[in-house]
Amino acid sequence: MSYEAIAIFMFISMMLMLLTGQRVFAAIGVVTTLAALLLWGESGVEMPFNAAFKLFNWYPLLTLPLFIYMGYILAESGIADDLYRMFHVWFGGLKGGLAVGTILLMVVISAMNGLSVAGMAIGATIALPEMLKRNYDKIMITGVVQAGSSLGILVPPSVVLVLYGMIARQPVSQLWLAGAIPGLMMAALFIIYIVVRCHFQPHLGPTVSRAERDMPMKEKLKLLRAGITPFLIFFFMTGLFVMGITSLVESSAVGATAATIAALVRRRLNRKVMEETIRKTLGISCMFMWVILAALGFGAVFDGIGAARAIESLFITNWHLTPWEVLIMMQLSYLVMGMFLDDTAMLVIVAPLYVPLVKLLGFDPIWYGVLYTITCQIAYMTPPFGYNLFLMRAMAPPEISLMDIYRSIIPFVMVMTLALVLVMVFPQIAMWLPEYVRTR
């Protein structure tokens, strides 16, 4: 059997294992182990062993549990609730103002957590009921929560970019910097869309009643204190890192410590909050570590059989595609897989193939990491089985049907596709900040 046939057989076997409902790391690990043993015999067991030590010797891995802990302690301690009340009062007088405030809330949550699940949970449980109560269009606001929560995998400290950096062997600090401006640009595009649409269709996002928002300026300014805590945490965590004062791992420790102190100062740090935070942090961190371990072993086997070179030969030599045509095909494949798989599964399956190919084609792997993440955001919201669609279905109130959820994402997917095209056509949107920090 040729190496090309072996690579295809491994890929198909892994997809079949995933379709059976097996955990991602188990499906990938079993296929990787069997392939290594069949190809190289007993010496093949060295591959997962070496992959494990490569993982545990990777110092930035310490950032993963620290950032996850930081996000969960802020959510469990109720700091996000206070933040939404601030946006509620300050933006309630604008048509679609609560939807705008929800997007801003998601940006802040993303900057404190790095996971889309946390943004979805907060948006669906805090923002969505408030907007429904005030007669916002249920289809539009369902799309707002889904689109806003997807920012969690692009805005620093994105856990998905950490995972990409580990598998692609790229510096996480550069990936974070590269994701910052595209993430904020996408949030701005969402806000522009909401404001413009609600201007022409005011019934979709009516203003909050004057009785609710008519309070003394002194009281309004007091509400701004809810935004001080997240801003300070983000500044101490990311600002110190960008200024070169702290390293990546030190920044994650600063963020986790600052979040704990914030919960303590507000008298919300109790046994229940700590238990929930630690339990969820441990569960998510262990899941990511197993996935990374399986991905590294899978990548080692693929490197060993020369699959990346085979794909390059297929696309360029046999099909005569240009590098940009190959890149577009790669992005389309993510969209197709995103209908059935989550971002970690997609990354683990194709990163061993695509990342070496990206380098061979002459593209920057840091820039490509941002493209991958934006494409994942779009795939998250692509029917029939987009990850965010079913998260929303599980968390949304009964009056929002699955068809409402499907309809809600159409304009936001178009906005995200525009953002993807802009970053592809103008790479400096992603690369300016990391280049500036690297050269100063």
Image: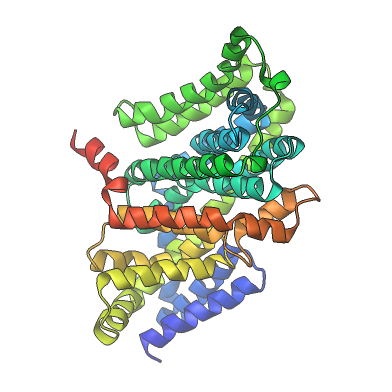
Viewer-proximal residue among 100 and 84: 100
* The C terminus, quarter of image: top left
Outermost residue, front direction? Answer: 200
What is the residue that sits farthest to the left in this orientation?
439
- Please state if 393 lies on the left or on the right of 424 as rendered: right
Q: Position of residue 121 (x, y in %)?
A: 66, 43
Image-quadrant location for residue 137: top right
Res 246 → quadrant: top left
- The answer to whether any part of residue 48 appears in the image is no
Q: Residue at x 39, y 41 (%)?
A: 180
Residue in the picture at 48% in, 83% down: 9
Is the N terminus in the top left, top right, bottom left or bottom right quadrant?
bottom left
Compared to residue 413, the image places residue 71 above or below, namely: above
Say left or right for 291 vs 361. right
Q: How is the image coloured?
A: rainbow
User: In the image, what residue occupies the spot 60% across and 45% down?
Assistant: 144
Question: Residue pushed farthest bottom?
Answer: 1
**Residue 331 appears in view:** yes
Above or below 47: residue 99: above
Residue 75 location (% of width, % of height): 64, 33
Q: Position of residue 306 (x, y in %)?
A: 32, 77
Q: Quadrant of residue 44?
A: bottom left
Residue at (28%, 39%) from the top-left corner?
433
Q: How many marks?
A: 0
Query: Position of 285 compared to 429: left or right?
Result: right
Location of residue 412 in the rendering, given as x and y in whole percent from the top left corner = 53, 53
Q: Nearer the viewer, residue 268 or 26?
A: 268
In this view, the residue in front, 398 or 356, is: 398
The answer to whether residue 73 is above or below residue 295 is above
Q: Is residue 331 left or right of residue 289?
A: left
